[in-house]
Amino acid sequence: MMHFFNPLLSHWATQTGPSFWLPAPVSNFADTVDGDFYFVYWVSIFFLVLITALLVIFMMKFKAPEGQKATSQNDHNLILEVAWTGIPVILSFMMFWYGYKGYVAMATAPSNAMTVTAEASRWLWNFTYPTNGAVVPGASEDFNEIRMGVRDGSLTPEAAAERESKVLEKAGLHVPVNTPVKIKVMATDVLHSLFIPAFRVKKDCVPGRIGELWFEATEPGVYDLLCTEYCGQGHSLMHSKVVVHESQESFEKWLEVAASYDETLPFEQLGEIVWKRKGCVSCHSLDGSNKVGPTWQGAFGSLRQYTENGVAGSTTVDEAYIEESIRYPMKKIADGYPGQMPVVKLTDKEILWVTEFIKSLGK
Amino acid sequence: MNPNDQAPSGSEVSSQETAKVAPETTESGPSYLTVTKTFASWALTLDHKRIGLMYLVGVLGMFFLGGVFALLVRTELFSPMPLITPLFAADPGAQADLYNQWFTTHGAIMVFLVIIPGVPAALGNFVLPLLLGAKDVAFPRLNLSSFYLWICGAAFFIYVLFSGGVDTGWTFYTPYSTDTSTAVIPAVVGVFILGFSSIFTGLNFIVTIHKMRPKGMTWFNMPLFLWGTYSTAVIQVLATPVLGITLLLLILERTLGIGIFDPQNGGDPVLYQHFFWFYSHPAVYIMIIPAMGVISEIISVHSHKRIFGYRYIGYSSVAIAIFSFIVWGHHMFTSGQSTVMNIIFSGITFSVGIPSAIKVFNWIATMYKGSLTLNTTMLYGIAFIFLFTIGGLTGLFLGVLSIDTHLHDTYFVVAHFHYVMMGSALIAFIGGLHHWWPKMTGKMFSEFWGRIACTLVFIGFNLTFIPQFVMGSLGMPRRYYTYQDKFEIYHQLSTVGAYVMAVGFFMTAFYLLQSLASGKKAPSNPWGGNSLEWHTPSPPPLENFHGVPSATDPYELDHFDYDPVTGNYSSRTTAGSA
């Protein structure tokens, strides 16, 4: 009996585009969640219409001038009380039951699922793929730039799409279609939450805990990935994309390219790629403006006041200081900044490139 | 269902020896407003009516302030690009910080300084002893001290505004709240103090209702507003200390790093969420249960009909109060709480919906075959039923585990709790304010402007929050300073709605203030109510009643004659003495 309604109600969910209420359904959970949604929705609409109709009819029918007596003083009816207690009890049990069934499926990943790690920091995502240890950035900064570009007219929709696919070559959460994928979520600083509306999945990223969600994407394409747990200044900019590849082969090919650097490029340029890819970009500007961390413009060779274990000190920004600041970000906190830099694991080469990049930004 | 649970019929109650109509009072002598006039006579008053009125002024002032921040937030969100924050800060990061402080300030002020004290402390203080035919609450000094604690808490909030604000959201979630450089500690101290204000009020009301009911008033003969305030008071006394302890631990974490909530010191941020919601979920019912009590009075009195299903409404208040303690985990379905816990909390959550549904149906049944006076107060009552229905039904979506996974922390949640906290609790507060305004001030307000303002508030409210349901389920997360272009139209509708609502509230402020200056004099019983506050002059004398009243049947509403000249309802049996 409990399963009777769901196939009927899933009818509303079996469309591919976004509906008035819900985004396009593109994961194995979407039909269940949307079916549950529309079950509650139509029950709610029924009661809302019923109650509104009663209110309006009573307002019209029993409206009376001051002083007129009510035509009845009846104040109880056991059958009515039983009915309007019993019917909500039955309906809400059904809702609970559907939600429970749907949720248990979401909470239990199949054992053959591919595992990807999603690590949230203020205000960036990093995705780690187990097969070759590739760390791929969320590239929120790029997606926001593209959004702003479209907004102010400096990017045509075509140019924006082109730029987006360029960025996605080395960024974003990539998964093959019709393959169970398990995302291990974690956070390095404060709470975040990983939300993919098109997949109907969400999980909080809690520092000190490893969370988990899973899904099977059903439609190749590019979808939004958002942070839904408030995390401060850049919360609304923690925006990345999920790319669903049309095959396992295309996914694997992408992964190979994503993990590599084009080492024929000059060090400064490689450093700029690291700056973007590893998320330095969200806190360190290149134009002299101060964000959460000091700007890199003219930083190299300048004098820096800092606090180390509560003791004030100063140093010239040189190669050694940069390397130390990357490896042990909380050791020397530059004065005037909150000291919120996460440990970003860079290879020795990446540190070298970043240092050359900072050098190139002038004294 | 126990068949013995039937509500008492009118004939049963009125046949009781003691439950006769109270003596009508004469309107001689000064009222509580005029009996003394010095500043000290107000500042140091032990009179529950004056304390209630001072609370009212304070709460409405804070409502204005919280409303200003709401408008700042909504104005900023009219566009996904920076719109008004650049007027206050040049740096893009600082602009986002400013927005975060605005929504935090809006939420914290509205929750802790407006809605929680709104109905119980402002309206409750004024009305509760009157409903009991008592001279005052059980502990008048405690009552005054709770008001000064409220002032003290409010002062901390004002201090926070001038010391760089706070940007954690009203929930103060760790580890963000232990990490941010904004003024978390003053804000938390403010909330801590407000908690004691709330506990004092609750304690006072529990004792007053237990010990000071008049001769002949049994538990099942009390006006339902008292059932509401009583259930609320129990939650205030039991749950608020947990919030106090949690906030103290948060302060210790921030100052000493004791490592209970901060994962860097081995603490657990999810533990904070458990502690916080163990109070803050019941707090939702601290807001809504007394509001439901107000609505029970309004619907019955302005329908001139006995309340339908008295016992069911009364019991459902108690049921909601009890269930409210065991559903807190539904705020944490995506937090990493275990699957079994989620299932249990989801199941219990639905049990809260049932008593709420029972109340709604009983209110509607009360209107059936009534004699409905569609004045401003009644319009607010009916608006409440509609808005609370939406608030309750959308809560069902969030209780269903699979759907909540999608909707959690989106604008759908924002819209849902605004329907409950503002569309229901606050609308009931405004409705109650109109219901008891003649009694409090001795003046009648303009019905014409009242109905227009109520309509504007109603339309504006729905225009503000219905688009938020849609964008939420489409995937718009909450607490976002900027957003994707596809959500722009919903945000714009929402902002327009907020301004319509603001116009309605400003109109309300003007005609209420105008009534103080030149309103018609209020008769003792302008609506035809039969609870005891309508059996004393408007405004009441210092000691509430001339003589000692005995209990009436509060819902026996058909023995009044209306006098169109004075606008008074007088009971037929004592009409000559009025």
Image (cartoon, rainbow, N blue to C red):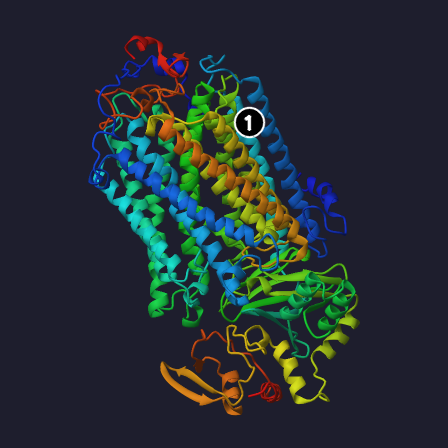
Return the chain for callout 1.
Answer: A
In this rendering, does residue A181 appear at all? no
Seen at 57% across and 39% down, the residue is B462
> Between residues B91 and B303, which one lies in front from this camera angle?
B91
Horizontal side of B161 relative to A24 (left or right) equals left
In this rendering, does residue A145 appear at all? yes
Horizontal side of A104 relative to B537 (left or right) equals right
Seen at 65% across and 53% down, the residue is B487
Residue B186 quadrant: bottom left
Seen at 65% across and 41% down, the residue is A39
Above or below for B575 versus B469: above
- Residue identified by numbered label 1: A83
User: Where does residue B178 sit, x and y in percent of width and height?
Assistant: 41, 66
> Between residues A110 and B335, which one lies in front from this camera angle?
B335
User: Where does residue A185 sit, x and y in percent of width and height?
Assistant: 58, 67
Q: Residue furthest front?
A: B518
Residue A197 quadrant: bottom right
Horizontal side of A322 relative to B484 (left or right) equals left
SS class, disc 1:
helix
Residue B544 quadrant: top left
**Residue type pointed to by label 1:** Ala
User: Where does residue A267 sit, x and y in percent of width and height?
Assistant: 66, 89
Above or below for B15 versus B422: above
Q: Quadrant of the C terminus of chain B?
A: top left
> Between residues A332 and B217, which one lies in front from this camera angle?
A332
User: Where does residue A43 sit, x and y in percent of width and height?
Assistant: 63, 36
